[in-house]
Amino acid sequence: MKTLVKLTVILILFTSNLWSQTLDDKVLSLEEYLGYVKEFHPVIKQNNLVLDESQAILMKSRGAFDPKLEVDFDRKEFNGSEYYNKLNGSFKIPTWYGIELKANYEQNSGVYLNPEATVPDDGLYSLGVSVSLAKGLLMNKRMATLKKAKIFQRQAEAEQKMLTNEILYDAIVAYFDWFKQYREFQVREKFLLNASLRFENVKRNFAAGDKPAIDTLEANISKNTRKLEYENARIKYLKSGLALSNFLWLKDNTPVELQEDMHPDLFSIESINSIIPSLSNFMDNDSAVADTLPEMNNHPKLVSLQAKYEQLNIQKKLKLNNLLPQLDIQYNFLNEAAENNMGWNSNNYKAGLRASFPLFLRKERGDLKLTKLKIQDNELEQSTAKVSLQNKWISLNQELISYETQNQITENIVNDYTNLLRSEERKFELGESSLFLVNTRESKLIEAELKAIQVQNKFVNVKATLFRIFNGTI
């Protein structure tokens, strides 16, 4: 009969319907573990807010093009006299370029009204346009803000992917360390049992007069040594489990503590290719490396740098536009009665011109120069990042190939030491060998098994690093 689920987070399995398969309640596989991390880890949830922020920024920048309704009312009365009563209502529509459409209604009255504010009794309507002919026509601040906000969305997605990848990578490294410590703990446990059984056999043989007393002492020393090594391995395994727990959370942001009897899936190494795809097939030779380099343009870091580069170019266009003189004109048709379409007469108008131009343009030229320097810095950073990624690609791939070879070598060494130990134990049973030689052979086998575990752990960590850097989100 199965025991109760030791990991509380597995309860979410039945409430969220995220995974429908039945799982061993004492085994936490890598695939299941990553599912919990991606779904419930608070930092990943926090990273998702970056996308929400970029959408909010885009909405805010689009607000610069929203139509605007304005009403201005001003009244003054003193000692029974109405000094003035002014009402001004307008409706403005900003457009993409430096053009603004405007409809206006104005009604003023009063004894001390400024003569220029005098309008017909029913009010005065106007319909017009204002245009920036130089500075602000083809590029202005609101246009630049909206363009940069659209690019920022792409940049935010890339940065969110990088941040999420970092958390997932750290989580995978923690799982592989837990896996490594568990396998080392198993090795220590196995050889502690061997040493204990050997000690009991030597004691029985000594009692029967077949073995000298010194063999019991050596067998006991070997057993206690294995017991000490077992305790050290057990503590390391428990500590690695606690480190793994840092990545396990419930839906309500409650941390989960991994129970002691939970252990990793022993088939995780064999099934890792289905979770972290192999990339070594792209790196068989130098030509393959060159062929895959263009794919690096999709790397989140390069996407983020490219987005920043595009934003700086928009900023550069805005700074160039600021070198132009300010030349704004406006023209409004005036009409006494809005319902009288024939009343719009080109002879009834209100027009204006505003011009300004700094003599030295030191502020504008300084801003432009600073922007150009930022663009150069970004270009250099992109070049450096591409070279760095290429070198990491080659280095990690060669490291991966080397560890594949080392895995095969250490596996052969373990098999050879295993056969050697069995032969030595058989000879000891026949009285043709000593306990010292048996313990020596066993120590060499333990070293070989631990070395094989370490090499395998390095192999999977390099594989995870290669995928994190070059293949996007896990």
Image: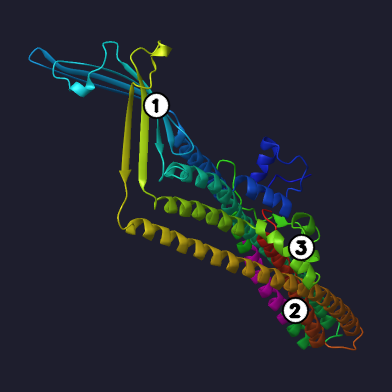
Q: Nearer the viewer, residue 420 or 159?
A: 159
Q: Quadrant of residue 410?
A: bottom right
Figure check: 448 above or below 309? below
Residue 412: x %, y % from top left: 85, 77
Determine whether, in the image, residue 236 is placed left or right of residue 213: left
Q: Which residues are magenta?
A: 221-238
Q: Is residue 383 magenta?
A: no
Figure check: 11 above or below 346? below
Dot 1 corresponds to which residue? 128
Element under label 3? Answer: loop
Q: Is residue 228 magenta?
A: yes
Residue 368 appearing in the image: yes
Dot 3 corresponds to which residue? 279
Label whose residue precedes the other's in the sequence (3 or 2): 3
Identity of the amino acid at label 3? Leu
Identity of the amino acid at label 2? Glu
Camera-nearest label, 3 or 2: 3
Going 38% across and 59% down the picture, which residue do you hit? 365
